[in-house]
Image (tube, rainbow, N blue to C red):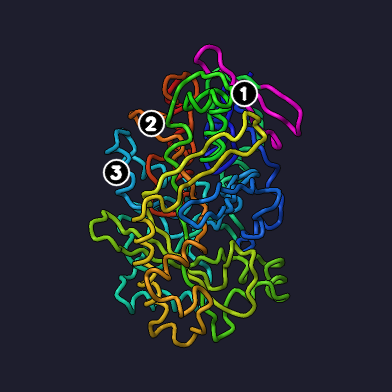
Amino acid sequence: MYDYIIVGAGSAGCVLANRLSANPNHKVLLLEAGGPDQRTEIHVPLAWSQTLKTEVDWNYETVPQAHLNGRRLYWPRGKTLGGTSAINAMIYMRGHPSDYDHWEELGNEGWSYEDVLPYFKLSEDNSRGANRYHGTGGPLSVIDPVAISPLSEAFVAAGRAIGMPYQADFNDEDQEGVGLYQSTIRNGKRCSSAVAFLRPALERDNLTVITHAHTTRILFEGRCAVGVQYLENGFPREARAQREVILAAGAVNTPQLLMLSGIGPADHLREQEIKVISDLPGVGANLQDHLVTGLSNYSTQPVSLSNAMKPHQVIRYLLTSTGMLQTNGAEVGAYFTVDSSSPAPDIQVHFLPGFFVNHGFTRVDGHGFALGITVARPKSRGTIRLQSANPLVTPLIDPQYFSDPSDLELLVAAFKRVRELVYSAPFDPYRGAELLPGWEVQSDDQIREYMKWQIETIYHPVGTCKMGHDEMGVVNERLQVHTLENLRIADASIMPTIPGGNTNAPTIMIGEKAAELILQTR
């Protein structure tokens, strides 16, 4: 018998395992469907794309997308200790203060920017030092780029040349501008949630971590969660919790597990011949994600990350954990506003001093650079639904990208401004031919069609068990599942709306706040 069972050792789950087991009187079980985070590429920052479509990736795929010419999009999700924080690009970005103030405006007391800022700071060991916005001494290493590529320097100069202000800190109260991106790297290696939070707690006798443990069902006595069933290396197992079951399995797997357990839209559950325990129509709804499109150019100078795998760079990294392989690639970026009515910058740009086509699977010879453009707060909403009552069958992922046409129109306007940046004077020493989309793509209709054929996820699904008290709410502001007892959710699925930035840092914050809420309960 455990006090707490945590399902999912991802960005938030590792935080929970650490914080809840800090009290030696709490007996904690952490279940992870994947294996240990032993794959070498996990820990080499620039090798992150080499983890995709491997054993540490759920390797999901969407259903055909009606507004993307029927394409199915590949969706990587981490399946190892650390979850997606073990395979992502390590960018540390919180979003804009107005994102969290909006959560509170929706009826979620205690989730305003001022409320959540202490939890962001609690996690941090920020190389910039402690101030109003940042913390030091926390488990999570957050650093500036160690060595800036000349192409990244050109990007920052180009942004300023077209009128963007220099942004010294994207994680303070003003995101607008161009500048350096911070990342979760420590001593030249990835600082995932597993490295930061779980590894220091593994020696505790009161924490049990089981890998290759695929949770299949939540167990109930009446309306009270009392444990879970799971498959450990394919063999059925059961574990019991006398205090709480906490789901931290992410925006895909958490709603799937709820529905498999009889919690969700009643009609859908009955279609799958699943007994309804609680009719919560919001389970699996409200799916939001960030898409990325952009431009790629050849570089006329051999200064890109195409050099990263040359023998001298590999040897340097193996010996010293320095050199090109210690960067995550996304050293710099920008935020700007297209829609003047937006309360915060509505476009995010990631710059990469190298080629990145088709998630890195498509190799491009030569040197180049890429700019990824993302709508920070898309309005399109999708769903996660069961394909089968068999827990080993992947769910149906339907983001319904561009179902709100304003998302595409924002991207078209943003694309033209970013192209202006690429063709400004600071890039003159480096800019070669345009690889994507190609200079012949000029009209708005051509840009739209290019995006529909080329655009991909930038790996930020959220919102499928949203926090709120309306009819689509799944958890309250204490992250307790409505109508049920001793069941809580703490992951990206509880976000009512997507923050305007990379979602790993907000998910870790949710883990920190959830741990405190849980510890306050008894």
Callout 2 touching callout 3 (CB < 8 Å): no
Image coordinates for residue 22, horizontal then vertical, percent:
55, 32
Lower position in the chain sequence, tag 2 or tag 3: 3
Reply above or below: 508 against 324: above
Q: CA distance from mark 3 to mark 1?
A: 35 Å
Image coordinates for residue 329, horizontal then vertical, percent:
55, 66
Image coordinates for residue 33, horizontal then vertical, percent:
66, 37
Examine the rendering and report whether any part of residue 24 can be seen: no
Q: Main secondary structure of the magenta part?
A: strand
Lower position in the chain sequence, tag 2 or tag 1: 1
Residue beneath label 2, please? 472
Q: CA distance from mark 2 to mark 3?
A: 20 Å
Magenta residues, as a range? 210-238
Say which of marks 2 and 1 sits in front.
2
Query: Which of 218/477 is in front?
Result: 218
Q: Residue at 59% across / 47% down in the picture?
A: 77
